[in-house]
Image (cartoon, rainbow, N blue to C red):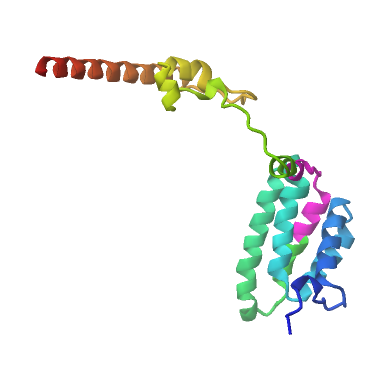
Amino acid sequence: MSPVPFSQLHTPGGYQNGEVASALQKEIRRGKEKEALFWATELELGGNGKYLWKRLLIIASEDIGIADTSVAVAVRALYENWQEMTAKVRYEQHAGFHRVFVAHAVCLLARAPKSRMLDHALMVMYSGERPRPPIPDYALDRHTSAGRNLGRGLKHFFDVGAQLENVSPIPDPYEIEAKVRQTSYEQEQARQKGRQSSLEDEVE
């Protein structure tokens, strides 16, 4: 007799695990905090805490994502707190205090701004036939064989390869000195290579 799939097993309230997990995510997407808390605790009470956290971690990226990047970090930290405290439950009088991390994560997710952009991006990149764009010319710098064959050195790298968009307003007091030092290093390397070639010519 085949074992019953996890999704078809039932929670203490008589619901199927798979349907509870789906309800949890849908309520979080709609910002329905109290309802989401009910479904989350229904899973946890059924001994499915680890599965619950797997779903919450996915939701943090799938339904919030870059709308608030701190949420995924916070949910991960809460999960680690839950793991640590769950291991101590048997030694503590207050055996349910670890569940506060579940409530914290669910409320945070329900109240967070939402974006499905990351999931949509995966659909575009992984579904159907993948496009084959050419390698952009600015990627062919001194760090690639093609760039070196084109004679592209540090000047090309600083002017083209290291070009940034969405530049942070944080000042960079090291930029000029770094360019000077790297350029001097490259020039010294070229001189040493030239001297080595001259010595080899003399030997021949």
Indicate left or right for 178 with 49 as reference.
Answer: left
Q: Residue at x 63, y 80 (%)?
A: 90
Image coordinates of residue 143 in percent, x first then y, are 43, 27
Image coordinates of residue 190 in percent, x first then y, are 29, 17
Q: Residue at x 44, y 21 (%)?
A: 147
**Is 139 rendered above or below residue 117?**
above
Magenta span of residues: 104-120
Q: Residue furthest front?
A: 129
Q: Residue furthest bottom?
A: 1
For residue 177, say whether it is visible: no
Image coordinates of residue 137 in percent, x first then y, are 54, 20
> On the image, which quarter does residue 78 sit in?
bottom right
Question: Does the magenta segment cover residue 112?
Answer: yes
In terms of depth relative to the viewer, which is nearer, 24 or 91? 24
> On the image, which quarter does residue 199 sit in?
top left
Question: Does the magenta segment cover residue 133?
Answer: no
Please count the marks in the image.
0
What is the quadrant of the N terminus in the image? Answer: bottom right
Q: Residue at x 52, y 18 (%)?
A: 160
Image coordinates of residue 105 in percent, x first then y, are 74, 58
For residue 13, say whether it is visible: yes
What is the quadrant of the C terminus in the image? Answer: top left
Q: Main secondary structure of the magenta part?
A: helix
Indicate left or right for 125 with 174 as reference.
Answer: right
**Is 191 rendered above or below residue 49?**
above
